[in-house]
Image (spheres, rainbow, N blue to C red):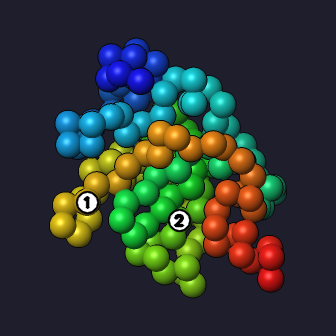
Amino acid sequence: MTRAEETTQTAPFVAQMPELNRRLRGHSFYPTAAQLARIPGLHGQDGLGTRARVHLHYFNASSDWYITELDPADGHAYGWACLNGDTWNAEWGYVDLVALESVSGRLGVLVERDRFWTPGPAAEVIPQLRKADDA
């Protein structure tokens, strides 16, 4: 997908969100309009636990964010985060996508949106949760 195609397919709120690192990243950080249309709002999957559908995956060299819900008004999201490979302390919680977009990790490594992500139930697509279910 070209930058122009990705821009025209991006939801209106996303077009107004700052993308400090888009040029370095080479693609949009925020979900496209088509992706956004499929993501439930905050609390939209309450009570589903590991059956909640993960719609977006963000990552950098050592951390992963799996997004299950998103408030399109302000970019706040909910999902599973594993920071710096610390699987022991990985947990469900809220994340501000605007703040996440501006993060530059060790040696300037940016947080990326996994543009090839296939949505699925958390228990099937999050490695740490697959291992927990297999045990």
Judging from the image, what secondary structure is the residue with disc 2 in? strand
> Which of the 4 image quarters holds residue 126?
bottom right
Q: Is residue 75 above or below residue 14?
A: below
Q: Quadrant of the N terminus?
A: top left
2 or 1: mark nearer the eye: 1
Query: Which residue is painted at 80% across and 73% down in the image?
Result: 133
- In the rendered image, the vertical position of residue 88 relative to residue 131, given as above or below: below
Tell me the amino acid under the disc marked 1.
Val
Q: Residues within 10 Å of mark 1 (few under 14, many from 20)?
A: few
**Rendered location of residue 44, percent (x, y):** 72, 43
The residue tagged with tag 1: helix, strand or loop?
A: loop
Of residues 116 and 55, which is closer to you in this image? 116
Q: Residue at x 23, y 69 (%)?
A: 106
For mark 2, what is the residue?
Answer: 81
* x and y percentages locating residue 15 in the rendered image: 35, 24
Can you identify the residue that label 1 sits on?
Answer: 109
Q: Name the residue type under label 2.
A: Ala
Q: Residue at x 66, y 31 (%)?
A: 38
Q: Position of residue 107 (x, y in %)?
A: 18, 67
Q: Give the side of residue 33 with respect to residue 59, left or right.
A: right
